[in-house]
């Protein structure tokens, strides 16, 4: 399914099953907000990231917040920049850097983890990775692109199937994720 179709399908599912979550999602990011994200990265945004921010500019202030994947709250443009800057600053005193300037955090998880989209010119360009704030010996979970991640999230929403050890639930018109 094309990325824009996945975003439309998520909106449709939310409208039918979790209308309060949909209502609380903010409007699209402005051109100035998109330009600020580009300036932070130092490169153009991947098309899917630009479409994502053109869909909604983050999760808004609703509780529970809208997650791009279970446990990962959708960040707006300003928060993407803030998280990226915090990660770069945290790396400044390390001999081994754990963050690349051209990784863009698009969602924030528990204990400082995030979903980051690789905007570098490496072989991993476009990949989405769960980045932990803590060092780990385990290989990080990745998806080939944002479309693959959101398609999987949409399937979990639509069918109630487990994803990232969670299953969707809807309470009083709001989407949430519970341990599966």
Image: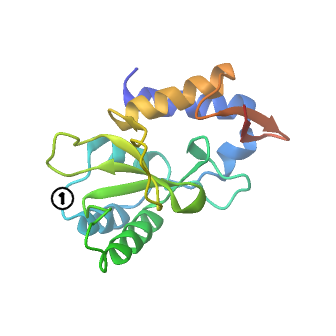
In which quadrant is the N terminus drawn? top left
Above or below, 79 relative to 176? below
Pointer 1: residues within 10 angstroms few (<14), some, or many (20+)? few
In which quadrant is the C terminus drawn? top right
Query: Could you say which is closer to the camera, residue 63 or residue 141?
Result: 141
The answer to whether 27 appears left or right of 71 in the picture is left
Above or below, 171 relative to 112? above
The residue positioned 47% from the left and 33% from the top of the image is 150
Query: Could you say which is closer to the camera, residue 152 or residue 37?
Result: 152
Where is residue 66? Give x, y as percent. 62, 47
The answer to whether 66 appears left or right of 32 in the picture is right
The residue positioned 61% from the left and 26% from the top of the image is 156
Color theme of the render: rainbow
The residue positioned 38% from the left and 69% from the top of the image is 87
Where is residue 83? Give x, y as percent. 44, 67
Which quadrant of the view contains residue 35?
A: bottom left
Where is residue 166? Give x, y as percent. 67, 34
Which quadrant of the view contains residue 91?
A: bottom left
Residue receiving disc 1: 43
Query: Could you say which is closer to the camera, residue 62 or residue 31?
Result: 62
Query: Seen from this angle, which residue lies furthest bottom?
Result: 93
Where is residue 124? Give x, y as percent. 23, 41
Query: Seen from this angle, which residue lies furthest front?
Result: 137
The answer to whether 169 appears left or right of 156 in the picture is right
Query: Seen from this angle, which residue lies furthest left?
Result: 121
Query: Could you say which is closer to the camera, residue 134 or residue 116?
Result: 134
The answer to whether 174 appears left or right of 12 in the picture is right
The residue positioned 48% from the left and 54% from the top of the image is 114
Question: Considering the numbered disc 1 on the image, is that residue within a helix, a strand or a loop?
Answer: loop
């Amino acid at each position: 399914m094309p990325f824009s179709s996945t975003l439309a399908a998520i909106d449709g599912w939310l409208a039918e099953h979790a209308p309060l979550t949909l209502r609380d999602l903010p409007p699209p990011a402005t051109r100035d907000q998109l330009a600020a994200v580009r300036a932070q990265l130092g490169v153009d945004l991947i098309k899917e990231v630009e479409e994502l921010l053109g869909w909604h500019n983050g999760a808004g202030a609703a509780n529970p917040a809208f997650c791009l994947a279970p446990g990962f709250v959708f960040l707006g443009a300003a928060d993407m920049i803030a998280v990226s800057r915090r990660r770069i600053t945290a790396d400044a005193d390390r001999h081994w850097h754990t963050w690349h300037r051209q990784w863009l955090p698009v969602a924030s998880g528990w204990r400082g983890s995030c979903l980051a989209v690789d905007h570098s010119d490496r072989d991993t360009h476009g990949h989405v990775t769960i980045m932990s704030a803590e060092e780990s010996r385990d290989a990080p979970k990745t998806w080939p692109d944002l479309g693959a991640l959101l398609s999987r999230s949409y399937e979990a929403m639509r069918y109630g199937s487990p994803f990232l050890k969670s299953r969707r639930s809807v309470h009083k018109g709001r989407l949430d994720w519970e341990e599966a």
